[in-house]
Amino acid sequence: MTETLAPARPAATAHEARLAALRNELAARGLDGFVIPISDEHMSEYVGAYAQRLHWLTGFGGSAGSAAVLADKAAMFVDGRYTIQVREQVDGRLFEYQSVPATSATAWLADNAGAGAKIGFDPWLHGKPWADATAAVLKAKGAQLVPVESNPIDAIWADQPAPSPAPALVQSTQLAGQPSEAKRSAVAEWLSAKGLDAAVISALDSVAWLLNIRGADVDRTPVALSFVLAHADGTAELFIAEEKVTPELRAHLGNAVTIRPREMFVPQLQALAGKKVAVDPERTVQAVFAALAGAGASVAELTDPTVLPKAVKNSAEQAGQRASQARDGAAVAKFLHWLSIEAPKGGQDELSAAAQLRAFRDETGVLRDLSFDTISAAGPNGAQCHYKVSEETNRAIDPASVYLVDSGGQYADGTTDITRTVWIATPDGLSEPTAEHKDRFTRVLKGHIALGTALFPKGTVGAQLDTLARMHLWAAGLDYAHGTGHGVGSFLSVHEGPQRIAKPQAGQAGTSTELMPGMILSNEPGYYKEGEYGIRIENLVLVEARDVPGQEGEYFGFENLTWVPIDRTLVDTALLTRDELKWWDEYHARVEALLAPQLQSAALAWLKEACAPLSRG
């Protein structure tokens, strides 16, 4: 009789071993589950390497998502931007794929955690609204949400990076447009008007804006890991690691800002007993609320008082943005010229293209960093809205295909963000996009133009404008699963609130924020065909006042900030109206005028051809 051998079990993957280790750690702590967000102690969208716990555990590299782990099952939660990416990066044998907002970690736990279950969470990584809502839902199911004193992933992550030791940097008043003293004074007036003693400022970009400082603690976002307590007398306390403090920083902050070690933050919160303290529940972790409540402080849940003034750029910041856009636009134009020559030959891939684009930005001599990881997406990878190229996913840029590149730079005078979608020709130059390619691209273009040329009254919010960018896609039964516009910082975060242009969605802030002159937003409609290609056209725009003959009340429009050619090869001119053709020609005339002085020889010749008037012929 022949013995039948059982098939060999595949070797455990690194993420399988990490998940098992986490479950062992939870069991040792008497916990039945744990929730892992992408976050840090400041509720940041982009986090330092030390806080990349979700990526370490699951392999997911997106910027938004979470996981929930129980003893016998686990799940990943992402929105429509990451539907494809999560399946490529996270092992479906280990984690169920769950779609937000159709469900959430809270709802999943309520359905899957048994009565009496203790579900752990790190109060330094979650906001109070989430903690309160989740605790209530679990309580109704007979389970319990339990704050942990230390993160269990940190206990099993043997080679976890340390937080960045980079020094904090001074942002000059010339670039900031307003001294820190004036900003602190405005916050003090706000506090006094509300009868409050202090405000907790914990969002990293808010700290940076308020004190006119920057840093290098988070890749792609020039911030320093720190907290601020702002007081009603105009003074402030900065909590920051001592190795980050330089003589220049001390001199810049002066006597009105007390610099304390970062570890003194909680003791100082506890010293606010009997004080009235403003805390933003959207931007502050649960641990801060717990510390204040435990000390007997009176907490007023109010929006961070720096958020709106930070979003409304002053004249110096606007000038800096225009300068950085002109500089960055020339770098992107050089890249597109290079791509038009090299990609048709073959031999280029997503990584080599991203590296070349970075090189052109570096040639400016003033690039501080990228503003986010470049989305260099060839063919089907372009169908992932927030694709992130890696050695494992790197794809050749093939001739006769669509290539999407979404990128940006961080300069001391501004933050840029631009997307261009181009047709990669064949060496003979005879290849043509399909009729579908042109139709989809032109519908995206029409939406981009409609939003960029919108005229709207004071009081308009982003959700009211979103339809303009989608209507031509909707007319063909098409849509895209991401917002149309996000705010952008001034040498700060490339995603800055509170303003946003998107479909109104429950629990999603920003779309109901009034658009005001000085706010910068992206204009980026798109279309994505899974497994084939992606299309997106993105410029940055500045809200500005407009004069309209016979107007009743105040009206606003958008000043375009991004000046780089749009690929004419993908345009179906028959779908464009006379006004849209006029927009195209005027836009590209401005592109040529702005960029031509920065380009030479072959790149200049390419620019002139790319900016030639677009005709129906």
Image: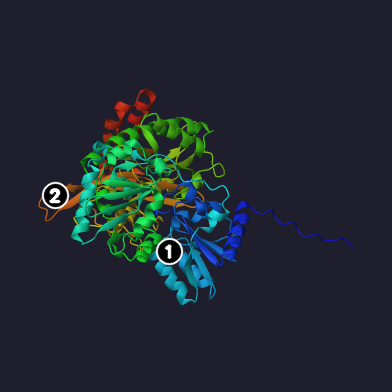
Residue 198 is at least partly visible in this image: yes
Task: Tell me the element at label 2.
Answer: loop
Residue labelled with disc 2: 548
Check the image and name the residue furthest to the top: 601
Residue 43 position within the rendered picture, expressed as x and y whole percent measured from the top left: 39, 55
Amino acid type shown at disc 1: Pro
Check the image and name the residue furthest to the right: 1
Q: Nearer the viewer, residue 244 or 56?
A: 244
The number of numbered discs placed on residues in the rendered structure image is 2
Residue 420 is at least partly visible in this image: no
Q: Nearer the viewer, residue 552 or 138?
A: 138
Q: Describe residue 558's horizontal placement relative to residue 504 as left or right.
A: left
Q: How dense is the environment of label 1, judged by Cα within 10 Å: few (below 14), some, or many (20 and up)?
A: few
Task: Tell me the element at label 1.
Answer: loop
Residue 101: mark:
1
Residue 259 position within the rendered picture, expressed as x and y whole percent measured from the top left: 33, 46
Considering only order in the chain, which callout, 1 or 2, is on the residue closer to the N terminus? 1
Residue 183 position within the rendered picture, expressed as x and y whole percent measured from the top left: 23, 47
> For residue 586, what is the image quadrant?
top left
**Residue at the location (18% across, 59% down)?**
193
**Mark 2 → mark 1, Cα distance in angstroms:** 40 Å
Residue 571 vertical placement versus 455 (above, below): above
Amino acid type shown at disc 2: Val
**Residue at the location (64% across, 53% down)?**
13
